[in-house]
Image (spheres, rainbow, N blue to C red):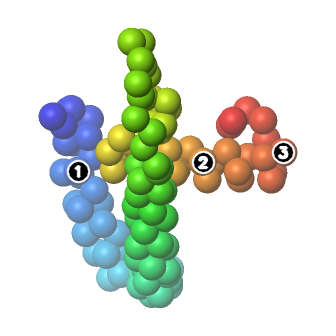
Amino acid sequence: MINSLALGLLLITPLQIEQLLELRAIRPLGIAVNIISSMARRIGWYFLIFFFIFVAFTHSLLYILHNRRYKPCEGKDCENTDNPSSYPTDFGRALSATIFFLVSIRAHVLGVEALV
């Protein structure tokens, strides 16, 4: 369920983009708006390709973690030690795990320990 803040942002964002595009009628602002819009069109492909690579990496992470060898347990108090509970079990959790993984790597590279 979408809360009221998220719903408000979803409704207001297209209106703000339309107002930004309407500013092209004012010459000094129109130049800046045209530069920003052309730049957004050029880097849009980069973000699309990055998104597909990110989803593929998340899918492969989920696939690798779930397709390990299964060792059947023979005993009274057996636990499934082959798939610990810390591994993601669905795509949404694998996506958030991948995001946190990449953020923690970036934090270590930059030397920022507050993000980890």
Q: Which residue is mark 1?
A: 10
Residue 47 in sight from this viewpoint: no
- Residue at 78%, 46% (x, y): give it: 108
State the image coordinates of residue 51 (x, y, percent, origin top left). 43, 69
Q: Are marks 2 and 1 in contact (CB under 8 Å)?
A: no
State the image coordinates of residue 116 (x, y, percent, origin top left). 69, 35
Furthest toward the top, the residue is: 76
Q: Secondary structure at mark 3?
A: loop
Instruction: Indicate which disc, 1 or 3, sits on the residue closer to the N terminus.
Output: 1
Q: Secondary structure at mark 2?
A: helix
Residue 101: which disc? 2
Tell me the distance, in whole angstroms, between the alpha carbons under discs 1 and 3. 35 Å
In this rendering, is residue 87 above or below 77?
Answer: below
Amino acid type for the residue under numbered disc 2: Phe
Q: Which residue is mark 3?
A: 111
Q: Secondary structure at mark 1?
A: helix
Q: Is residue 33 left or right of residue 1?
A: right
Q: Quadrant of residue 113?
A: top right
Q: Toward the viewer: 67 or 47?
A: 67
Q: Toward the viewer: 26 or 53?
A: 53
* Neighbour tally class for label 1: few under 14, some 14-19, many 20 plus, Cα within 10 Å: few
Q: Toward the viewer: 52 or 43?
A: 52
Q: Is residue 52 left or right of residue 108?
A: left
* Quadrant of the drawing holding the N terminus: top left
Tell me the distance, in whole angstroms, between the alpha carbons under discs 2 and 1. 28 Å
In this rendering, is residue 1 above or below 10?
Answer: above
Q: How many marks?
A: 3
Amino acid type for the residue under numbered disc 1: Leu
- Foreground mark, 3 or 2, reads 2
- Residue at 26%, 35% (x, y): give it: 5
Tell me the distance, in whole angstroms, between the alpha carbons under discs 3 and 2. 15 Å
